Amino acid sequence: MPNRVIFCQLFTKSKEVREEFIQKLNKAGQDAKKNEPGTLKYACFLPVDDADETTLYVIEEYTGDEAFDTHMALPEVQDMVKWLGTGTVLSGEMKVKMNLTYVDDFFFTRPELKNTKDPFVAVAEIEYKPGGVAESIPYWKAVVEEGRNNEPGTLMYGIAKDKDPGNENMLYALEIYESKDYLYDVHVKSSAIQNSIANTKHLRNSLKHHFLKLAGGILVKGNGTF
């Protein structure tokens, strides 16, 4: 069964509520690190724009649906779900992607990520024209292979599709770099990325980036190769 990835963009009612949410997520992540072998990633992020004091992002990764269900059934997780439902935490419309899975083997995580204090995180939402996803796949394969083999500062990279009905034209790029400079000076300038842009830009309807910084939780477990 392929890994299951969750991506959430949440809007809290205040900076103080967001901080409380981060504390709860960080504790859940540390518990998962010790007690949940099927939970591979459980981390929360803030926008790099410090003027945004209420938005919070969450990325989770599980070995499959069973591991996700096990996590969600935990009493402390259920308590957090109830807290979110009190009406005192969230404001506005959430963006919650519950059924992302990696395309083939288009993902890697380097063990060095475990000790990177301030990684630069980018999440891209790409909407393609009908048929564009399939046409873009060979170029994404080259991008992932280039990152895996020749970009030591690209610490995590994954290309995911959305299994939910109606989202067959969407892809998501989950990216973590040692720094913002590495993203723009090395990764973006690679021949693989430049070829991808040149040959697939016309296939897109839209491209939206989220640039983030780590706020808490876990991104690497074990040897860090999943």
Image: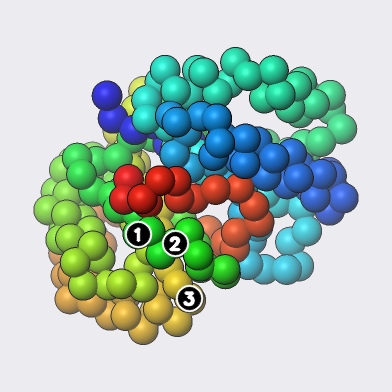
Numbered disc in front, either 3 or 1? 1
Disc with the residue nearer the chain's start (3 vs 2)? 2
How crowded is the residue under tag 2: few (<14 C-alpha within 10 Å), some, or many (20+)? many
Residue toward you, 30 or 217: 30
How crowded is the residue under tag 1: few (<14 C-alpha within 10 Å), some, or many (20+)? some
Residue toward you, 178 or 48: 178
Disc 3 secondary structure class? loop
* CA gap, disc 2 and disc 1: 6 Å
Residue 199 position, x and y percent, is 16, 64
Residue, disc 1: 110
Residue 46 position, x and y percent, is 65, 57
Residue toward you, 211 or 129: 211
Residue, disc 3: 179
Whether residue 101 can be seen here: yes
**What amino acid type is highlighted by mark number 3?**
Ser
Whether residue 58 can be seen here: no
